Amino acid sequence: MSYDLASYGAMVADRVRMAAYEEALRRVVTPASLVLDIGAGPGIMSLIAARLGARRVIAVEPNPLVRIAGRLAAENGYAERIVVVHGRSQQLELAEKADVVVADLRGGLPNHAGHVEALADARERLLKPEGVLIPMRDTIVIAPVDAAEAHAKLLSPWLDNPFGLAMTGAADAIANQGALRLSKPGRLLGPGRPVAVLDYRKVTTPSLDAAVDLEVAQAGVVHGLSIWFEAELVPGVVFSTAPDLEETVYGRLFLPLRLPLEVDVGDRLRVTVKAALDDDLRLWIWRGRLEGADGARKARFTASSAFHNPESPVVVDALGAGAAPRLTEDGRIVREVLDRFDGARSVAEVAASIVAEHPGRFELVEDAVAFVRDVAERYGEATLRLEG
């Protein structure tokens, strides 16, 4: 994504973001520091590092607007200390490795636009072993959200169009688009739970695959999963893009549900979120089920950006006849469950055998029972055994 100057201006004006980054740089920059600013844009982080006394700052950015960073460096008297490089950090070679690397290539989420990959490359090639990487860690968090206005705005053009035309295909597609911006923050119906921790000191991929239980603390209607990140730039310097806090330039995002779910206090959403993100494939999957306080299943949902535009070349290549798919762990477990459907073993017995063979996959035996029951409902024919 290539930003215009107005977009960069919004980033500079974001008080939450900039106050945290300025404080992080203040804590680590010394007169001996060589600072590498990745994704520098017009150079705000470079200017701050220079003002804090950095010996030398290298501002690297593929957007041609990085040349403005040179003008601003001269305007502030830092022309001799700030070096502007038009290009990508992955193409950069340094005679001397950096003491500090600072970057913010995030979009609405940190696993966006090469942010993780750029930091991993910088960590391995461009940063001294004892150097400091800013940010240090991002945690991706989700929570159930009542966002009626945003949900209606998303779907109403297709479901309530004034022409009397059937457009449910478009409604289905947009509900599977992926992380969308909330026009208003909505109302969180339960506490946020982390689905991924991106520790930039060791992470190498932006992809994620996590299962999480979301508690419902307020009755309402779930229109989707609010998703945000909590950043730790250096130890003790943090900020959050949570929807119930001050809005940031990153926006407020959610993964929508095609059909909203009515929920009561004590209900639980058992959710799986997966993201396969690389240069060739960007797929999101979010699915789960709603259970009552007594554990009874009330509803299920499945969504994926693969359903947004199934004719796209990326999806066709990934899912088409030419692909050579491999079973995931869950796929292997499903196959094992099917092999055990012999008309003699009960759901509980099958679940117990699966738990024994896959320790750590299921947090509770009840989780395995629910998994087996789901497979049985799809592919099995129940046999009731009467004892005596």
Image (spheres, rainbow, N blue to C red):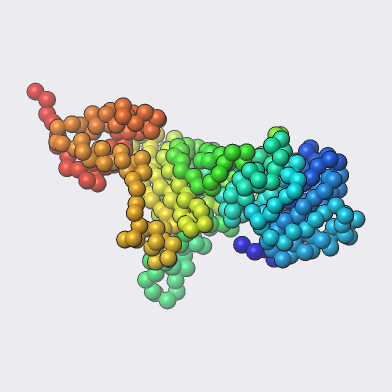
Residue in the foreground of this view, choosing between 131 and 134:
131
> What is the tally of numbered marks visible in this picture?
0
Q: Quadrant of the C terminus?
A: top left
Give residue 160's quadrant in the image: bottom left
In the displayed structure, does residue 279 sit left or right of residue 85?
A: left
Q: Residue at x 34, y 51 (%)?
A: 325
Q: Residue at x 39, y 69 (%)?
A: 167
Residue in the foreground of this view, choosing between 342 and 55:
55
Q: Position of residue 251 (x, y in %)?
A: 62, 54
Q: Is residue 256 above or below residue 376?
A: below
Q: Position of residue 62 (x, y in %)?
A: 68, 61
Q: Residue furthest right?
A: 77
Q: Position of residue 36 (x, y in %)?
A: 74, 49
Q: Residue at x 70, y 58 (%)?
A: 61
Q: Residue furthest front?
A: 95
Q: Is residue 360 above or below residue 214?
A: above
Q: Quadrant of the N terminus?
A: bottom right
Q: Residue at x 71, y 47 (%)?
A: 102
Residue in the foreground of this view, choosing between 70 and 296:
70
Q: Position of residue 279 (x, y in %)?
A: 52, 57
Q: Residue furthest left?
A: 388
Give residue 234's quadrant in the image: top right
**Residue 16 in view here:** no
